[in-house]
């Protein structure tokens, strides 16, 4: 019985090691720049067929990695929005921005060495393989992000819908790029990164997003937007990857 449990645990550990190694490599080089052999070697697996054994293909591994992080972020974000909606007060743009930012950090829990490679991984994937990225989400794991956008549409200053949508595109790019920079800094042990280690940085980040969403609109912009209220082509992912 103990041997059976130990064997099962060993398989689980090997599987997780492959996933961790793959995500780290994909975050740096993208999925096209990493071979199956490199992943297996980085995971310190003696059997070079271990990735195929556990996942079937590299693409199947990529899909699982996307879903793992997206599910966690989406669950956290929906829980945070539930809490905000149950509070007896008027919500603000900043409240919703916090619900966009904070659920997307600390994905590795106490393992700060992996804090985390997920955002960099999906940022590169969405830019280079948007179809695969969207498909891996199964049209399910961005419900919290879409829910947050609905709140923002009501809370932002009065402006054409097209202007709000454009700001959401800006916000998505800003979220993914800044959180990717933060991830990279927190995994770098070669030198100190006081800005990214400070909790005040995330608070300031939230403030800057809030200001962007609430900024007055030049009345000359979007003069004809009332006739055509365009929305981004796709809003995908759990950190705001918007494909326009």
Image (cartoon, rainbow, N blue to C red):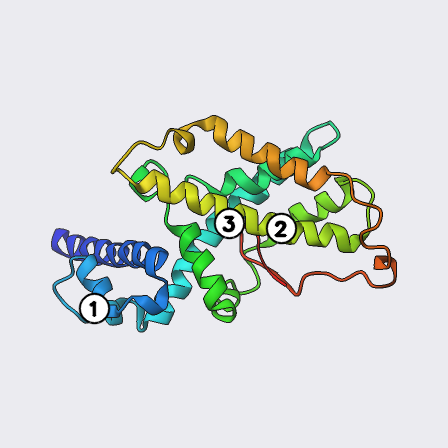
Q: Are marks 1 and 2 in contact (CB under 8 Å)?
A: no
Give the number of the disc on residue 223: none
Picture layout, residue 62 above or below residue 193: below
Quadrant housing residue 99: top right
Q: In the image, is residue 46 above or below residue 185?
A: below
As helix, strand or loop, the secondary structure at mark 2 comes to helix
Question: Relative to residue 26, is residue 147 drawn left or right?
Answer: right
Give the class, few, some or many, for how many residues have Cα within 10 Å of label 2's Cα (few <14, many ≥20): some
Circle 3 residues within 10 Å: few <14, some 14–19, many ≥20: many
Q: Residues within 10 Å of mark 1 (few under 14, many from 20)?
A: some
Image x and y of residue 212, in percent? 67, 40
Say if residue 111 shows up in the picture. Answer: no
| CA separation in Å, label 3 and label 2 | 10 Å
Q: What residue do we see at 39% from left, 59% from top? A: 65
Residue underneath mark 2:
170
Q: Work out whether mark 3 precedes mark 2 in sequence or the reverse, and give the earlier one.
A: 2
Instruction: Give the image location of residue 102, x and y in percent.
Output: 52, 37
Residue 171 vs residue 19, the one in the foreground? 171
Q: Using the image as rendered, state which of residue 150 and residue 138 is in the foreground.
A: 150
Can residue 188 be seen here? The reply is: yes
Q: Which mark is residue 176?
A: 3
Q: Most extreme residue toward the front, as rendered?
A: 220
Of label 1 and label 2, which has the lower sequence position? 1
């Amino acid at each position: 019985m103990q041997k059976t449990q130990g064997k099962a645990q060993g398989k689980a550990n090997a599987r997780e090691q492959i996933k961790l190694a793959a995500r780290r490599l994909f975050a740096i080089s993208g999925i096209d720049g990493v071979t199956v052999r490199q992943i297996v070697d980085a995971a310190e697996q003696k059997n070079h067929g271990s990735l195929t054994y556990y996942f079937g293909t590299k693409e199947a591994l990529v899909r699982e990695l996307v879903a793992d992080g997206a599910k966690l972020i989406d669950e956290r974000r929906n829980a945070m929005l539930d809490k905000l909606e149950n509070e007896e007060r008027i919500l603000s743009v900043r409240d919703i921005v916090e619900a966009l930012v904070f659920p997307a950090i600390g994905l590795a829990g106490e393992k700060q060495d992996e804090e985390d490679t997920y955002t960099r991984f999906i940022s590169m994937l969405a830019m280079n393989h948007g179809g695969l990225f969207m498909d891996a989400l199964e049209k399910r794991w961005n419900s919290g992000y879409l829910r947050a956008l609905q709140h923002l549409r009501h809370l932002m200053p009065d402006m054409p819908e097209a202007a709000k949508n454009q700001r959401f595109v800006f916000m998505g790019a800003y979220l993914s790029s800044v959180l990717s920079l933060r991830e990279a800094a927190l995994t770098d042990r070669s030198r100190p990164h006081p800005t990214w280690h400070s909790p005040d940085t995330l608070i300031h980040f939230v403030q800057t997003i809030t200001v962007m969403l609430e900024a007055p609109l030049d009345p000359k912009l979007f003069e004809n937007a009332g006739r055509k209220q365009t929305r981004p082509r796709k809003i995908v992912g759990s950190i705001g990857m918007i494909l326009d």
